[in-house]
Amino acid sequence: MTFKSILDEIENNLNKILSDLFLSDVQFSVEPAKPGFGDVSSNIAFLLAKQLKKSPQEIAKMLSEKYSSCRNTLVLKSESHPSGYLNFYANWDNLNQLILSESHLETCGDVDIGNGSTIVVEHTSVNPNKALHIGHVRNIIIGDTISRILQKAKYKVNVLNYIDDSGLQVADIIVGFTHFDYDQEPPNGKKFDHYCGDNVYVKTTEKYEADPGLEDIRKNVLKELEDGDSEIAKFADTITRRVLAGQLETCWNLDVTYDCLNFESQIIRSGLWDKIFEKLKEMKLIEFENEGKNKGCWVIRGEGKEEDKVIVRSNGTATYIAKDIPYAAWKLGLLADPFNYEKYPSEQPNSRILWQTTLDKTNPISKNFTGEKVVTVIDSRQARLQKIITSLMGKFKSTPDAYSHLGYESVTLSSETAKTLGLDTDGKQAQMSGRKGLYVNADSVYDILKEKTKDETKKRHPEMSDSEIDSIAHLVSVGTLRYEMIKQDLDKIITFDLTKSLSLEGDTAPYIQYTYARASRILEKSNRTPTIDVNFSLLKEKHELDLIKNIGLFNLQVRDATNNLSPKVIARYCHDLAVAFNSFYEKSKVLDLNNVDLENARLCLVTSFKIVLEKALSLLGIKAPDKM
RNA sequence: GGGCCCAUAGCUCAGCAUGGAUAGAGUGCCGGACUUCUAAUCCGAUGGUCAAGGGAUCGAAGCCCUUUGGGCCCGCCA
């Protein structure tokens, strides 16, 4: 137990007081207090004001008096504030010990919300015809962070990446290769995914605009992609897998890994659609139109004033959204699994095994990557389609919230950055576009950051070896990028600027990582093995207690982040922890105090801080170096 | 025409779910702190009609309604 212990103690006591007063069903809050108002606050007096026909202040006073006779181990005293709040002061001698010894446990920060149940997180899912750009990175980092948090909350998480290898975007580069003779080997050793995106895709789509007659070729290729035996499909398969390899390299470099890759082409060929189509008809979730503009189509009725959505065209083929329905149902385990599984040919960096679906029956391995719940990370431009899927899944499964769409706003380019890419936006931010070549690649951003952080590290540590500098710069670059993508709320647009967005100061990962390095140095120089057998009551300075309090809030933050599927909660927590430590660092010396007991106690605090920050950062996929 | 999201300090954002105390950070600008456990740091100063208007409430940045400004979505494309 952690800081939550004192909250629980207070809540229990208040409930007891309420029942003694024959009051019940009051949903009062017990929360960490704002600075200057003790350690814990409750709004209970406000809520009772009407019922008791007294002012909140009077009630708080009355409750505070009653509280003093409650059994307490963690509360020193309660106090009524003139505003009406009931504030509590912690017995820090006891609470210090509780929090700091807890922090050494492997389970520190764990909350049991998932209870071991399975949950699918699908993210990334980028068309395999181009390299990942900074907009995709937001999706990837949100998805990866959420899956780490859910794991901490005791879910068994299956991370999926959906590979749309039979769509229009893939058809476009295939047309480029087959009709415009693009070389299959990129020039000057360019990464294959970059080459396909920057050269083949952009240039091919330019040609469509110049010659509308090419549209037929494109349609034909698209059709052949769905037929697994066609030469085009086989060729496309080799191309998309090479692009995918490049994309995965980018993800792995950012410490993002997966459990399984699901290929759209295989979903199409598996016949899952036919099964779900029958089910939709049976359950009368779709209707056949006999007249009107959608005559001859199967549609889902729009709610209210919304338009009907065509699912099956009048020529009998399924639309884009229709392809998503069987996949969503498969993720929830609602369909018999038509796939076998094989290991992906390359290994992931953290040795997590990556599987991929296959329809090859020669060496059948079955696996289960479905989940009782599903979180699909897609940007909010897809909200409408995702709403339809969510509602359908709610009807298939008894638990209506089993499927959820985690939406987020897009990443746009600042006008300055757009200008460097050759687009004058008249001072406005610009939407990225893979087709128009208007984007900033993830790999380039990483490279820029790496150079920058290398320079910074060299400046500070001229004595370091190149490999040491390289590994620090890698951790800091990845951290910076990941933190930048996660620190604000999902519904805020991120305007990416090549210079401004890559700051290493202030509310950034390097700030937090630097704090970690400071702690590491203290422990290193102390030449002592950390121990928790110390006199905790020696820690009583305000900034010490503040740091301890922050350390004790870890599991509450994990709970908050999980319940709200909100990764930024953890980002803010890491930042708060670092701020608290820096304040401690400035004001309290740890070493050379000529006071062994105090030194031991402070070393214990530094150790706890380091352990908890490391765990919290790991939820963000960020590692901190011991020196930087 | 219908739907979703955003609006808080010069700029970028927390706080809003669950109304209550003094609306917080970062950044910028100005000033200060390296002979010290690492200055990618810290301290101070500056900076706010919480977009506007209305409503319910003892009490609103937060809840409800309206308006304005901005972004996005609404194809038998994917």
Image (cartoon, coloured by chain):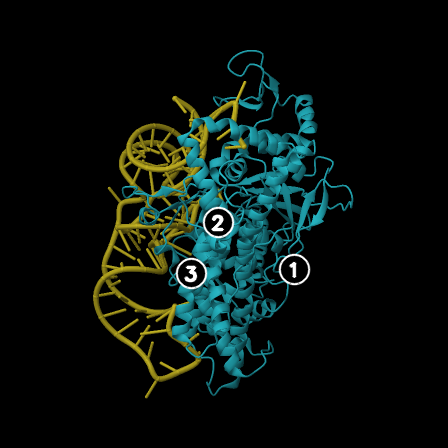
Chain colours: A cyan, B yellow
Q: Amino acid at mark 3?
A: Leu
Report the disc number at residue A351: 1
Q: Amino acid at mark 1?
A: Ser
Report the disc number at residue A421: none
Residue A599 or residue A470, whichever sits in front: A470
What's the CA distance linking mark 2 and mark 3? Answer: 19 Å
Is A488 situated left or right of A11 in this image?
left
Where residue A261 sits in the image (x, y, percent)? 63, 46
Q: Chain of mark 3?
A: A
Where residue A288 sits in the image (x, y, percent)? 61, 16
Q: Amino acid at mark 2?
A: His
Picture layout, residue B55 above or below residue A493: above
Which residue does the numbered mark 3 point to in the structure image? A449
Q: Is residue A430 visible?
A: yes
Q: Nearer the viewer, mark 2 or mark 3?
A: 2
Residue drawn at 44 percent across, 32 percent down: A208
| Label 1 vs 3, first from the N-terminus | 1
Is A189 situated left or right of A343 in this image?
left
Label pair 2/1, CB-CB below 8 angstroms: no
> Among all residues in the image, which is located at the extreme bottom?
A594
Q: In which quadrant of the rendered image does the C terminus of chain A lie?
A: bottom left
Which residue does the numbered mark 2 point to in the structure image? A194
| Label 2 vs 3, first from the N-terminus | 2
The answer to which quarter of the image holds residue A371 is top right
The kind of secondary structure element at disc 3 is helix
Q: In which quadrant of the rendered image does the N terminus of chain A lie?
A: bottom right
